[in-house]
Amino acid sequence: MNNLLHRYLFICVMALMFLMLSCDQTDHTIADDPYAGGRQQLGIQLLGDAPVPSAAYPGDTVVFNSKGLLQWCDTENKSYEFDFYLADEKSKIAEVTETSISIVVPENVSTGITYILMQGQVFYGPRLTVLGNIRVDNEYGIRTGVIGELLCYLPHRDGSGDVYLAGSFSNINGQPGNSIALADRRGNLMANNSGKFDVSTPVNSGGSVTSMSYFSDGRVLISGTISSYQNPGNPGGTNYLANHVMWVNNITVLNSNFSALIVVDTMYTNGVMQRINTPVFNGGTDQNIIRSFVTSDDNIIAVSNAAVYCRYNYKLSNSFGYATELSPAGNVMKMNGEGELDTEYRKNLSGPNAMILDAYRDRNEGLFITGEFTTFDGKNASRIVKLTPSGDRDETFMGNIGAGANGAIDMIRYNETLEKIVLTGKFTQFNGQPRNGVAILNSDGTTDNFNIREISGGYVNFAAALNCEKVVISGTFTKYNGISRGGFLILEMDGEAVQNYNMPGVFAGQLQQVMEIETTMGTYGLLLMGNFNRFNGERINNIVQIQVDFAD
C-alpha cells in the first residue's frame, strides 16, 4: 500500500515540474496596449458645480463649468462634435470656452440632470431646475412626510381648511399615528384629544382606511381594512372589562371628532357578567371594504369583493372570543346607521363576474363601480357599471358607454363640480375610441374629448379632474408627446401639456388623491397624496403641497 502511495506522489511531482517548465517558455513581455479595443480618452469633463444661474426658464442661457471641450469645437462656425442634453432634451449650445459651456434651455423641458454626449460616451453634469408656474410650498408643515400610504382625505365640516388624512401609515411628520391624522391648512398636525380630534389609539396596527364620509348630523363613517378601533376607555363601575378592544368588521361609525361611537353592552365569561364598550354600528363584511358611502337618508352603501355580511352577537360572546353571525350578501350591500343589513337591497342580483377594484358616487347618488369584470348582474358591463340609488343598473348610462373598456379599470375619480368621471387602467380603448389608459366620461356615460397623447417609458396610474378644468396625471412614463417628462403632469382638458406648469422633474410612485387647497401663501394649490418618494426629483414621503399659477 505504501509503495502505491509513493508511486502516486512521484507521478504528481513530475507532472507539476513539467507544467512549470512549459510555463517558463511563455513570452512574459507586456503588450504596448494591454487595454486595446477600449474607447479613446476624450479629455473632456462636465463639472458638477452648480450652473449659473442654478434655476432658469425656457429660453434662458445657463453657464456650466467644464474642461477640455474647446478642442472639439469649431467656434468660428459654431460647430461642435458633441451634444448637450438637459433632462434628455437636446439643448442649443451658445458658447464654449476653455472652462465653460453655455446652453439655451429648451422651450419644452423638465427639471433634470444634464450631460454631454460625444462619440457614444456620456459625461454627466449637475441638475438644473427649470422654472415655471409650479413650486413646492415649503412652508407646509408636514415636511418629513408619512411612513405608509395616504389613501383618502375628508375636509372638516367647519370650512376652516382643516383636513382629516387617512390611509395605512404608522408615522406622520415624525409623530406616531395609526392611519388617521388631522392637519390644519398650513400642515400643522393637531394633537390627539384636541377637541376636533379626540382619538387615543386609532385604527389597529397594519389597518388601512380607504373611505371617510359624513352623516347629516356630523357623524363620520370610515371603512377599509379595519379590525379594531381605539380603546374608548373605562367609564368605571362593577365588573367592567378594562382595556377592552373595540372590534369592528372593516367599517364603523364615529363621532364628529373621530372618537368611538359606543354603547355599553354585557357578556358573560365563566358565568360572570362583564360590561364592555361596543360600537353602536354593528355590521360589516369579512373582507376589506373598497369604498363606502353615506346616502342622503343616512344609510350606508359598502362596496367590496366579499359576499358575506358580519355581525357580532355579544350575548353569545365572552372575553375568550366573539361570536360572529354571518349571512349572505352581495358585493354591494346597504346597511342602516347601526349596521343592520337591508336584505331587500339588490336582492337576488348576482353582481360582477370578476374583481371590483374601485367605486365612486356622483352628486345624484349614482354609484360607479369599476374593475376587471365583463358582466354585472348577468348583463354586459365592460369593466364599469353604474347603479341607481335603488341599486339597479342605470341602463341609459350603460347604453352610452357601449363597449366600455378593453382592459381593467383600476381607479375611478369623480369631479362633482364638472360632473366628470375619470377612469385609469390597463385599457387602450373605451367604447371603441383610442384611450391610452385614461378616459373621461360625461355624467351620462358619453366619452369626453380628453385624450392622452403618446406616452413612452411607462404608463399612467392616476388621473383626476380639477375644478379649474385641468387634469392631473401621474405614472411611470418618461416621455409625453415626445418630450421628456418625469411622471407627473397637469394637462388641459384636451390632453395638451403646457410647458409653464409641466416643468417639475422626476415623480416616482403612485398618487391616490389630489385636493385643491389654499397654500400657506394664500394662493391656489394642490395637496398631493399617495405612495410616492420623489417629486421634482427631490425626496418626498407620500405627501406634498404645491403652489400652482395657471395664469399665462
Image (cartoon, rainbow, N blue to C red):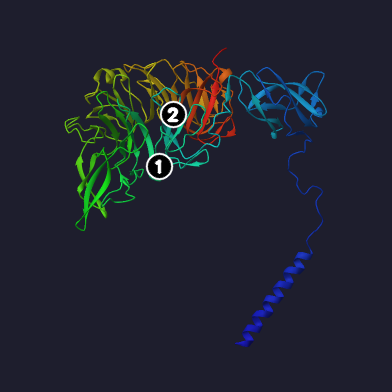
Q: Amino acid at mark 2?
A: Val
Left or right, 538 with respect to 431, comes to right
Is 401 rendered above or below residue 39? above
Q: Secondary structure at mark 1?
A: loop
Name the kind of residue labelled 1 in the image. Ser
Distance from the alpha carbon under mark 1 to that under mark 2: 18 Å
Q: Earlier in the sequence, mark 1 or mark 2?
A: 2
Residue 163 is tagged as 2
Q: Residue furthest bottom?
A: 2
Q: Is residue 155 left or right of residue 173?
A: left
Tell me residue 458's x, y (percent). Answer: 50, 31
Q: Nearer the viewer, residue 14 or 509?
A: 509
Measured as percent of width and height from the top left, residue 442 is found at 36, 16
Q: Which residue is mark 1?
A: 200
**Which is nearer the eye, 459 or 362?**
362
Left or right relative to 261: residue 489? right
Crowding near pointer 1: few (<14 within 10 Å), some, many (20+)?
Answer: some
